[in-house]
Amino acid sequence: MEEPTRDFVISVRNLAKMFPDQEGNPVRVLDGINLDVKPGETLVIMGGSGCGKSTLLNCLIGELRPEEGRILYQTRAMSRPADLLGMDEEAMNELRMRFGILFQSGALFNSMTVAENVALPLREHSYVDPSIIDIVVTLKLEQVHMRPHREKMPSQLSGGQKKRAGLARATALDPEILFYDEPSAGLDPVTSAAIDDLIIDLSKKLLVTSVVVTHEMDSAFRIADRMVMLDRGRVLKVGDRAEFEKLRDTPPEQLATNEERLIHQFLRGNTRGPLTDAEGMSEYEKWIVAG
Amino acid sequence: MSEAAPETGPGRLTAGIIAVGHATQNAYRGLIDRVRYVGGIGYLLADTVRWIGRGTYDRRARVSSSTLAAQMVRVGVRSIPIIVLVQTFIGIILALQLAPTMQDYGSIEKIAVIVSIAMFRELGPLLSAVVLSGFAGASIAAELGAMVEAEEIKALRAHALNPIRFLVVPRCVATVVMLVGLAIVADVVGVLGGLFTAWGVLDVPPLIYLDQTYLAVVYKDIFTGLVKAGVFGLEIAMIGCYEGLNVRGGAEGVGRATTATVVKSIVALIATDCVFTTVFYLFKL
């Protein structure tokens, strides 16, 4: 097993996660993932539906327990890297306070107002006076341009507003790492671009490390410093945004390997190419072809 | 594995053996599922008790009084009218059902004795619990189920907030406390239902009725009823929370959890009641 590099916030080594299929046999949804997230960068994890990117995110945030591998975290508060998988509940909670997550739906608590949602982590994890909490909440909401909506209930908000409010709550405890799960999903292009700007803005202003899971290519190219392409539970390519831009803009016949052509097809959103060929024919199609 | 049953003798035997094998396998799986369910509820209960215990000395593990009050209002206060209505009817029904027999014995005023003992020991707690399983249990399951679907539970954990402490503990405490309270209300209105029926229909003077009630009911009748109410409350809360937190499959899953909560709660309530009654009988309580 190769040793993790030193300069990282998160380092994933040989990660494997299995789920049982319908017959109960284990299927490797993640298969030997190696990945480093460097301090201060915005890393975009992308891939088609079912490639394992959501599973990877759930493993990173401690929602799922992988069967094999290590997930090392090194936050500013840690003297040395700690393996997520070896942590007890208390250590896990300490770490969770160092990161924020923007869920796909925003995941606001529906029984609370926007302001109460943002105040909740502050109220529960700090001993500060309610008046101070109120000021912090105002600041956090201002950061995402949601101050006028502070007294609204989540059901009164639009999709984009929910994500903004979710982002304000995710940043409430001044996290070092922000995870975004499909930040553009279900939003119109303008709102989606506005959320992207916000992600860029926050990572600059708050000096956070961001990990974004998405399959929206416009958004990915706007926000990424580095990108990771996953396919069927494996890392296909890790590289700078420029490398991926080059892959996207090169015609497929000039690309050397099948993997590059596959990434090109994904980035371009073409219906024909190795990605769709690799999925293969269904049993029905094979039966038709075989006569 | 052959699906079609062959027509010949030995083939039929094989098919029969296979069918028995399948039935055994299904029964075994069913048993495992049930054991897993009870085990899951047991774990949830243990975790809930642990968090309640921690809340007594650790400020950060404590449930805020406003959250608890909100749950109490939702679980208990809102169900008072329906409990009053149901238990009054039960009091009236009991009095009228008993009347002919008691008239035959020439001691119509003894209706008060039977109505009060039945209400305090049995019907007050049990029927309040049945009403509450539909009223509170189902709504707890639906609410938590919707929270699971909206990733709210995940978000709680992501903010280092334990969902058991944050969601289950207040609902559990509120249901237990309020069901004990509701059982007291139920006892009183049940007795009053009997009293007004005896007075208005059967010509038993209210003072005699009350006197008979006072003489008949002893502390242990009230106490055993309230202990049962507390345990029933715990069961409803645990089943509702467990079903809600384990919702899978969107709106349909939430619907399934709601129905399952009511059905399983009622079965659990009556089974527990049977156990309690046996124990109380054996120990002459």
Image (cartoon, coloured by chain):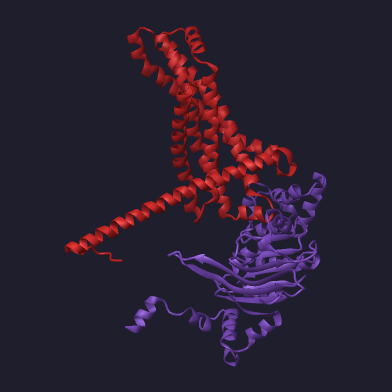
In this picture, residue A281 sits left or right of residue B187: left
Residue furthest toward the left?
B8
> Residue at horizontal 41%, vertical 17%?
B95
Residue B145 position, x and y percent, is 54, 50
> Residue at horizontal 44%, vertical 41%?
B263
Q: Quadrant of the N terminus of chain B?
A: bottom left
> Residue at horizontal 67%, vertical 85%?
A246
**Of the pair A270 and A157, the residue shown nearer to us:** A270
Q: Where is A123 relative to A77, above or below?
A: above
Residue B123 position, x and y percent, is 46, 25
Query: Chain A rendered in what hue?
Result: purple
**Of the pair A1 and B78, the residue shown nearer to us:** A1
Query: Chain B rendered in what hue?
Result: red
Confirm whether residue B65 shows in the render.
yes
Residue A204 position, x and y percent, is 79, 68
Residue A100 position, x and y percent, is 71, 60
**Of the pair A244 and B285, the residue shown nearer to us:** B285
Q: Where is B91 relative to A42, above or below?
A: above
Residue furthest toward the bottom?
A254
Count of numbered marks: 0
- Res B165 → quadrant: top right
